[in-house]
Amino acid sequence: MSNPIDQNKLEKLAEVAVQVGLGLEEGQDLIMTAPIEAAPLVRLITEQAYKAGAGLVTTLYSDPEATLARYKYGHDLSFDRATGWLFDGIGEAFDNNAARLAISAENPMLLANEDPEKVGRANKAMSVASTPMRKRIVDFNINWNIVSYPSADWAKQVFPHDSEEIAVKKLAEAIFAASRVDLDDPVGAWAEHNKTLAAKSKWLNGHNFAALHFSGPGTDLTIGLADNHEWMGGAAKAKNGIVCNPNIPTEEVFTTPHALKVEGYVRSSKPLSHQGTLIDNIEARFEGGRIVEARADKGEEVLLKMLDTDEGARALGEVALVPHSSPISQSGTLFYNTMFDENAACHIAQGQCYSKCFKDSENLSENQVRANGGNSSQIHVDWMIGAAETDIDGVTRSGEAVPVFRNGEWA
């Protein structure tokens, strides 16, 4: 079988990951995580990183067959454990200014047929153990980035009626288009795109809304915004001073909600693929900032276990605005991958807030972030709530409603 993945575009993706995604600096170490299927992209990124002057590039691979072996043969008590020692070590590397890059390529339905209770326990153990690593990422201490690779299992999930070769080719081209590496000058295209996202953020920051009101099918939701919140989108400067694009692709501008000021009900507009389980048609009701009722047509048990991870899991840590006309939305492709699907629709995230999304964030302590309304949790799980019918109003401090979105588009 011939290679269905355009190698020239894959090389461009590696270049974009290092130059745009990470902004990797000379002498900086890089820690990369990837499924074993993504090794071709790992090798290209490693080459680009060393060409950019990287110190040491270290890759940690995962293997879907090994993951399934755990569920088939693993002792029951193993599902309450995770490799905390590994995450502690990665956290220490971040404290020494290592950059972080994750390659997403997993089969989104890998664990669909496994025991939901074990999946939930394993996810919780992973969330707890990875806190030292994750906190340094969500606090934006270091430059980090996520890109994707078209594995065969993922491709067959997205394009189930095509042969494996055709499915991989289609998914590869969709990833390349969303990542802007199908253009002659991807780095220049990202510079222009970042300007557009920065302009949207500036407009929202100028209004300094007290809340956003979402209305649409199954949705009447008011999201209070954290005190001294700041909107961000596209490229941003990490606390180590390096400008990076954490997500490639990205179409969103986002900020921090107030953990105690979310009221109403909401329905998901796209399925959520969470840790190998598909959760579809989520409906949730918020009171006092917390989800007090939740259900789903599929994956409800995993959803409820996720919401019970800890005290902060039922509150919001992020609200993000994405127009329905975004390229990923207009592609009509459901990727079963949050990094792509969240860039097709407005979304919210359960759990940990981004402390970067506050004015003067570099000088805020954890207690000050919490006092401003920022949420704290061991999880950060995005799910999509925007659609072509979505209207959003910004609510001013005096209670005036200012149109932000109409029919899924910037107003």
Image (tube, grey):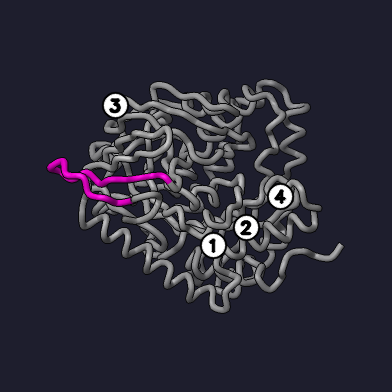
* 334 horizontally vs 35: left or right: left
Whole-Å distance between the Cαs marked 2 and 3? Answer: 44 Å
Q: Which amino acid does label 1 sit on?
A: Asp
Determine the residue positioned at 71% across, 50% down. 159
Q: Which residue position is annotated with label 2? A: 58
- Look at 46% across and 48% down and name the residue there: 345
User: Which of the marked residues, 1 or 4, is nearer the chain's N terminus?
Assistant: 1
Compute the Cα span from label 1 to label 4. Answer: 37 Å
Q: How far apart are marks 4 and 3 (CA)?
A: 41 Å
Evaluate if marks 4 and 3 touch, with contact meaning CB atoms under 8 Å apart.
no
Residue 356 sits above or below residue 49 on the image: above
Characterize the local packing of mark 3: few (<14), some (14-19) or many (20 or more) Cα atoms within 10 angstroms: some
Image position, residue 356 (x, y; %):
34, 51
Labels 1 & 2 near each other (Cβ < 8 A): yes
Identify which residue, 171 or 134, lies in the foreground.
171
Amino acid under disc 2: Thr
Residue 29 bears which disc, if any? 1
> What percent of the width, then of the height, locates residue 95?
44, 52
Which residue, given by chain and number where applicable, does mark 4 sit on? 159
Q: Position of residue 48 (x, y in %)?
A: 61, 71
Q: In this view, does 178 lie to the left or right of 140?
A: right
Q: Name the foreground residue: 334 vs 121.
A: 334
Q: State the mark number for residue 288.
A: 3
Which secondary structure, mark 3? Answer: loop
The answer to if 210 sits in the magenta stretch is no
Circle 2 crowding by C-alpha within 10 Å: few under 14, some 14–19, many from 20? few
- How busy is the neighbourhood of tag 4: few (under 14 within 10 Å), some, or many (20 plus)? some
Q: What residue type is labelled 3?
A: Gly
Residue 398 rendering spot, x and y as whole percentages: 12, 42
